[in-house]
Image (cartoon, grey):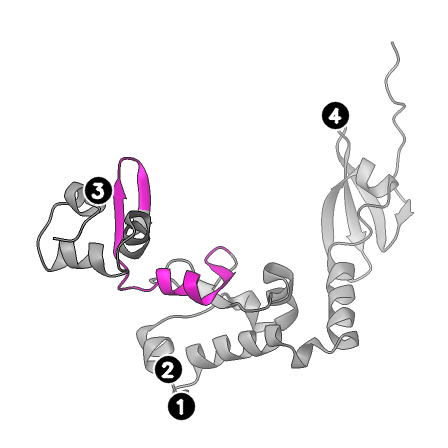
Amino acid sequence: MGGRKFTNKVGNTYGRLIVLSLVEKSPLAKWLCACECGNKKVIYGAHLVDGGTQSCGCLNKEITSKRVKTHGLTKSKTYISWHCMKNRCTNPNAANWKNYGGKGLTFDDSWQDFNKFLLDMGERPNKTTLDRINNNLGYSKENCRWATPNEQQSNRSCTLWIEYNGEIKTAKEWATHLGLAPGAVWNRIKLLGWDIEKAVTTRKNG
């Protein structure tokens, strides 16, 4: 049974890339390529042939940059969120500096570039704002999301998270589950000293 015929691609050009040398022949051929921008990158041969990869990544950045300018995203809510994030982390004169930059919170270096921020986060959906998943960490792709006001409220530093019977909810969510007032479970634990099981299973106040 014959396999796919191996073809030497050294010297071939694919988009902005020129193949310099073979890096690995099997199981899938990989080639060292030089991009017009000066960068070098190892790329699978199949991605070169099918047109899936045409540059070291610079082409996608240029397309995104052009899209930003074409669609006026520099005046969008996404851009405003990015600008405000930078401002509260770097500007001591910002109104909320003390809660961000003043506490040592920073943002990923690559997010100095709005285009990179846009690539990582996408455009800001309606009725959302930029939220840090872990409030003890700074802004990065891994620690940020677009969140609704309710999601942000549940993620505040003062929110009480409770685990019971394999489920993790905020005190407010447990209260809602029980049909109680939003602060009922929090009050039971923090003010009345109830244990967790009693606090999240008792359906009547008392």
21 or 198: nearer the viewer: 198
Q: Quadrant of the N terminus?
A: top right
Q: Is residue 104 above or below residue 58?
A: below
Q: Which residue is mark 3?
A: 201
Q: Is residue 158 magenta?
A: yes
120 or 39: nearer the viewer: 120
> Residue 52, image x and y in percent?
81, 45
Q: Which residue is mark 2?
A: 97
Query: What residue is rendered at 17% in x and 41% in y?
Result: 197
Disc nearer the start of the sequence (4/2): 4
Disc nearer the start of the sequence (3/2): 2
Report the disc number at residue 26.
4
Secondary structure found at label 3? helix
* Magenta region, residue range: 142-168
Report the disc number at residue 93.
1
> Residue 152, image x and y in percent?
41, 64
Q: Is residue 43 magenta?
A: no
